[in-house]
């Protein structure tokens, strides 16, 4: 069994565990689709992080007449109104990115293009 080593004198409650084999698991029926989903999720999170940083930078440029530093961007705390607006914008982005993964797909369109597919009469 794997062992977790904790570098502390503080009492802990760690115990042996059996690691899961998630690296070889298939969740969406095809490992390539799983990999594609992971890549899209990573890209989506990067896009959102950049959009949020851009919103902060634009706000600071407007407030400070163009004089903005990296420190100002890093320390910026959005207002509750900005948090709500950005949350709605983020949710729209997530929905638009992942909607393709939630569509029902029961027509094997691409299989008809395969050279060995039997031709439909007519």
Image: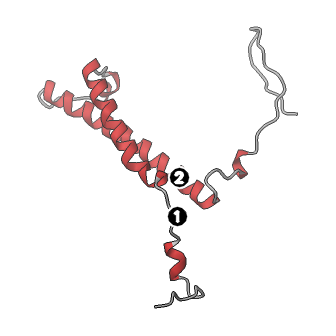
The disc label shown at residue 106, or none: 1
Q: Mark 2 points at which residue?
A: 37
Count the numbered circles shown: 2
Name the one closer to the observer, 68 or 47. Answer: 47
SS of the residue at dot 2? helix
**Structure colour scheme:** secondary structure
The answer to whether residue 79 is visible is no
**For the residues bearing labels 2 and 1, Cβ distance under 8 angstroms:** no
Provide the secondary structure element on which disc 1 rests: loop
Q: Dot 1: few (<14), some (14–19), or many (≥20) neighbours within 10 Å?
A: few
Locate residue 16: give its quadrant: top right
Q: Residue 76 carries which label?
A: none
Between residues 69 and 82, which one lies in front from this camera angle? 82
Residue 121 percent coordinates (x, y): 50, 90
Direction from residue 110 to residue 5 in the image, left or right: right
Residue farthest right in this picture = 1
Q: Which of 89 and 3 is in front in this view?
A: 89
Q: Where is residue 109 in the image (x, y as percent from the top left)?
A: 49, 73
Residue drawn at (31%, 33%), measured in percent from left and top? 88
In this rendering, position of residue 99 left or right of residue 65:
right
Give the residue drawn at x 78%, y 14%: 13
Residue lying at the far front of the rendered structure: 122
- Front in this rendered view, residue 55 or 92: 92
In which quadrant of the rendered image does the C terminus lie? bottom left
Q: Judge depth for marks 2 and 1 and give the one in front.
A: 1
Rendered position, 68 above or below 48? above
């Amino acid at each position: 069994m794997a062992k977790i080593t904790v570098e502390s004198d503080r009492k802990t409650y760690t115990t042996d565990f059996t690691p899961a084999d998630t690296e070889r698991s298939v969740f969406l029926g095809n490992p390539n689709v799983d990999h594609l989903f992971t890549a899209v999720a990573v890209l989506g999170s990067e896009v959102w992080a950049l959009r949020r940083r851009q919103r902060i930078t634009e706000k600071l440029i407007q407030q400070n007449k163009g004089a903005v530093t990296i420190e100002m961007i890093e320390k910026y705390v959005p207002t509750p109104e900005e948090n709500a607006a950005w949350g709605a914008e983020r949710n729209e982005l997530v929905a638009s990115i992942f909607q393709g993964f939630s569509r029902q797909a029961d027509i094997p369109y691409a299989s008809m293009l395969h050279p060995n597919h039997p031709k439909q009469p007519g």
